[in-house]
Image (cartoon, helix red, strand yellow):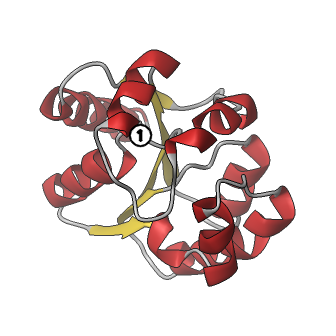
Amino acid sequence: MIVVVMGVSGAGKSVLGSRLAERLGCRFIDADEHHPPQNVTKMASGTPLSDEDRWPWLDKLNALLRQETHAVLACSALKEAYRVRLTAGISRYRIVFLRGDIGLIRSRLKSRQHRYMPASLLDSQFAALEPPAQAIEIDVSADAEACVGSILSALGAFKRAR
């Protein structure tokens, strides 16, 4: 199964996704590592990406995921259209939505240095966010291990239901 861990910048996608992949014994893919240089330059300058900027990136990620049978992808995937594009042609996947209030996320962003994602883009991410209807929803105010445990429990329940 493919697990897409999604949410705004600072929600914990990379930390939780990599820990989850380790616990599941599968590959971890960080979508940030696959942005084309022009997207990185645009974000680093404080300019939000447009849908047109994202389509080739999402298509590249989809192609990577189609080569995997079992992987965890950390990706913002803020809009439903992005998630549809990411998972096109993939029969077994689950979306994990990392939910946190803007105050918590803003405080996290102040204490970290991302190589190209400035904290100034957080408001645009929350504005674009379309929470998924069918997802494992995780409150990221809990510590990382509790969040991973909750995800694993929910994935186990999903497997048993199928």
- Please tell me whether residue 34 is drawn above or below residue 151 in the rendered image: below
In the rendered structure, the answer to whether residue 1 lies left or right of residue 21 reads right
Residue 24, above or below 28: above
The outermost residue toward the front is 45
Secondary structure found at label 1: loop
| Dot 1 amino acid type | Gly
Q: Is residue 141 above or below residue 3?
A: above
Q: Quadrant of residue 37?
A: bottom right
**Would residue 101 be visible to someone looking at this image?**
no
**According to the image, label 1 marks what residue?**
10
Locate residue 59, reporting x and y percent. Answer: 70, 74
Residue at 26 percent across and 49 percent down: it is: 15
Q: Residue drawn 63% across and 80% down?
A: 36
Q: How many marks?
A: 1
Location of residue 160 in the rendering, given as x and y in whole percent from the top left corner: 33, 35
Query: Residue visible at 24% across and 50% down?
Result: 20
Q: Which quadrant of the figure contains the N terminus?
A: bottom left
Q: Residue 18: percent from the left, percent from the top? A: 25, 57
